[in-house]
Image: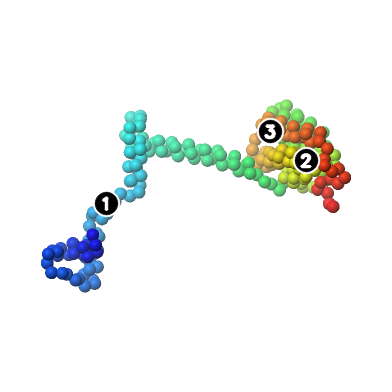
């Protein structure tokens, strides 16, 4: 219906009579009166329409003795709870897998690679996989320092150790070194718990590095030029 039609309808003037041209205030009053009629305000809210849609969605589904509307609400609540729980569980996992830290590999204790490997083996024998992984990565780095493959750099991080060691050996060892650094940081600083597979992977990497000659042995990686 056009604006003129609305005004005419609101005024009650018959269409078969002479043309009517209301003044400004009169036209405004007619429009307000027309738009205040109930039929213009009967559109359902989004919430009501959503609940109706849910009811139609679950029509015919088992309701366990509950009214269909309540059954739909219960099902949606269960779905939301499951999704929320999954996000709560997966969130910390994603965060710990992305841990990057500026904290050093070694603490204040100065131990040899052999001592650190012994600590790792003892922890693994007890099933203390977090401790085993941390000490085995430290043994790996200390072993490279003892072989003068890496320079002894105070405060070196796991990322830096992996990068420097990757530069000293062929490229095929780089993925394992990067993964080992991630595992160390995630377990030592990110709250992730290690398992026997993590310790086994670090053990294999340590053995591979010990059996491999570096590409250059005259200047340790990380030393000042």
- First-in-chain label (3 vs 1): 1
Describe the element under mark 2 as helix, strand or loop.
Answer: loop
**Label 3 environment density (alpha carbons within 10 Å; few <14, some 14–19, many ≥20):** some
Q: Position of residue 219 (x, y in %)?
A: 86, 46
* Residue 116 locus on image (x, y percent): 79, 35
Q: Secondary structure at mark 1?
A: loop
- Which label lies toward us, 1 or 2? 2
Label 2 sits on residue: 170
Query: Quick one: which residue is furthest to the left in this view?
Result: 17
Task: Work out how far the residue at label 3 is from the one at label 1, CA to CA, in angstroms.
Answer: 64 Å
In contact (CB < 8 Å): disc 3 and disc 1: no
The answer to whether residue 108 of the structure is visible from this angle is: no
Tell me the tag on residue 198.
3
Q: Is residue 58 above or below residue 37?
A: above
User: Can residue 53 be seen here?
Assistant: yes
Q: How many angstroms separate mark 1 from mark 2 (CA)?
A: 74 Å
Report the side of 64 relative to 6 (left or right).
Answer: right
Q: Position of residue 146 (x, y in %)?
A: 84, 39
Q: Residue at x 12, y 64 (%)?
A: 16
What x and y, as percent, mark residue 80? 45, 39
* Quadrant that contains the N terminus: bottom left
Dividing the picture into quadrants, the one containing residue 195 is: top right
Q: Residues within 10 Å of mark 2 (few under 14, many from 20)?
A: few
- The mark that comes first in sequence, 1 or 2, is 1
- Classify mark 3: helix, strand or loop: helix
User: Residue at the location (19% across, 71% down)?
Assistant: 21
Cβ atoms under marks 3 and 2 closer than 8 Å: no
Separation (CA) of disc 3 from disc 2 = 23 Å
Quarter of the view holding residue 141:
top right
Question: Which residue lies under the disc numbered 1?
Answer: 42
Q: Give the colouring mode of the picture.
A: rainbow
Q: Are marks 1 and 2 in contact (CB under 8 Å)?
A: no
């Amino acid at each position: 219906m056009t604006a003129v039609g609305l005004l005419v309808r609101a005024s009650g003037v018959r269409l078969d009579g002479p043309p009517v041209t209301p003044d400004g205030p009169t036209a405004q009053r007619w429009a307000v009166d027309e738009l205040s009629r109930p039929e213009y305000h009967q559109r359902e809210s989004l919430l009501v329409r959503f609940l109706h849609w849910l009811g139609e969605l679950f029509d015919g589904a088992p309701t366990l003795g509950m009214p269909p509307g309540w059954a739909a609400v219960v099902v949606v609540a269960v779905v939301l709870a499951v999704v929320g729980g999954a996000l709560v569980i997966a969130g910390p996992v994603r965060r710990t897998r992305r841990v990057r830290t500026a904290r050093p590999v070694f603490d204040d204790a100065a131990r040899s690679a052999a001592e650190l490997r012994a600590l790792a083996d003892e922890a693994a024998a007890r099933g203390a996989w977090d401790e085993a992984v941390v000490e085995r990565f430290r043994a790996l780095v200390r072993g490279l320092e003892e072989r003068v493959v890496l320079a002894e750099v105070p405060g070196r991080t796991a990322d830096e150790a992996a990068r420097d060691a990757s530069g000293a050996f062929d490229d095929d060892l780089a993925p394992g070194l990067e993964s080992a650094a991630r595992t160390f940081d995630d377990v030592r600083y990110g709250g992730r718990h290690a398992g026997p597979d993590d310790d086994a992977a670090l053990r294999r990497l340590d053995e591979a590095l010990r059996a491999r000659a570096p590409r250059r042995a005259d200047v340790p990686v990380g030393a000042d030029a």
